[in-house]
Amino acid sequence: MPIVAKSILVVAKSILALLLLTLINFSGFAQDTIAVNKTIRHTIKSEYLNENRDYWISLPIRYSDSLEYPVIYVFDAEWRFELVRNIAFDWGANEKIQNAIIVGIPHIDWRKKRGQDLTFSHSTYEYDGEQVDSTWYNDSNSGNGLNFYKYLTKELIPNVNRTYSTNNHETLIGHSYGGYFGGYILSLDHPFDSIHIYDPSIWFSNGEVTEAFKNTRYTKATKIHITYQPEPEFHKRKIEEFIEALERNKNITLTKTFYPNETHNSLYIDSFYQGIIKTNK
């Protein structure tokens, strides 16, 4: 065989070998990513809620039982779990935040159960400050927050810690009613190191979250990231009153963002984007 032909053959074999190696490496990484970044579903038979409740898990890249991970609990999992887990998975893999286990908390029937799960009373106020009668908020749509809190802290979190390798650093992410819930539990003996509160319904029961916090001797070191937007004015004012109360407590590390050009729902993605960097790095 001519020398030139042999040289071409050697080069061709080298290129083929390099291409195969590249494909194998890429395939291995892709399989690793796809295999890990999936939803794992669990069910708890809750004594506090007297029903079966699901929760969803997403593990970080190359999850290992020999390591311990922080856990991020996400309310409104029906809408928010996919968003949060994909951002957290990517950022953990790229070392922008700590690799974390994501726990999505859905509701059985969000039209009724969401309000029951995430509120602690029956409001006589609406988000715009209008006073309403008892037909608006009652047992059918609100006020079961204490039992849901017991489910969260006495059943769900212990179940996650038994099943997965965790380090007892826990973050709670709540939006709207979920943000109200995150604010309300500051007056309880909660387990969270970080709480994200996005455009919270502090208007509920005319600011009972703020009053409960003011009447609490709060001593737990906690990172709180709170965000909000301007509409309606009553809603905005109640959040700002809550922020003022938080700023007076030396045990709280508070970060906040006001979004003048966003809506109640559109601020969520940037709230998480900014907040998780500040609280989970």
Image (cartoon, grey):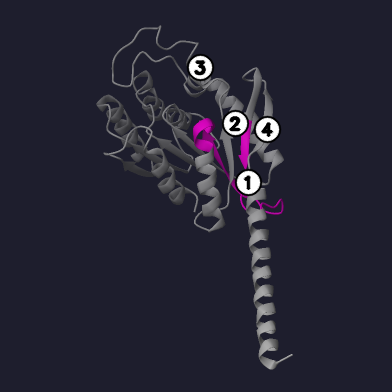
Q: Secondary structure at mark 3?
A: helix
The reply to whether the C-beta atoms of the residues labelled 4 and 2 are less than 8 Å apart is no
Disc 2 designates what residue? 153
Disc 4 designates what residue? 42
Q: CA distance from mark 3 to mark 2?
A: 22 Å
Residue 18: give x, y in percent of width and height: 65, 74
Residue 208: give x, y in percent of width and height: 38, 22
Mark 4 is on which residue type? His
Q: Residues within 10 Å of mark 4 (few under 14, many from 20)?
A: few
Q: Label for residue 59?
A: 1
Against 273, is 107 above or below? above
| Label whose residue precedes the other's in the sequence (3 or 1) | 1
Q: CA distance from mark 3 to mark 1?
A: 30 Å
The residue lying toward the viewer, choosing from 174 and 20, is 20
Lateral position of residue 112 relative to residue 229, left or right: right
The reply to whether the C-beta atoms of the residues labelled 2 and 1 are less than 8 Å apart is no
Lateral position of residue 232 relative to residue 145, left or right: left
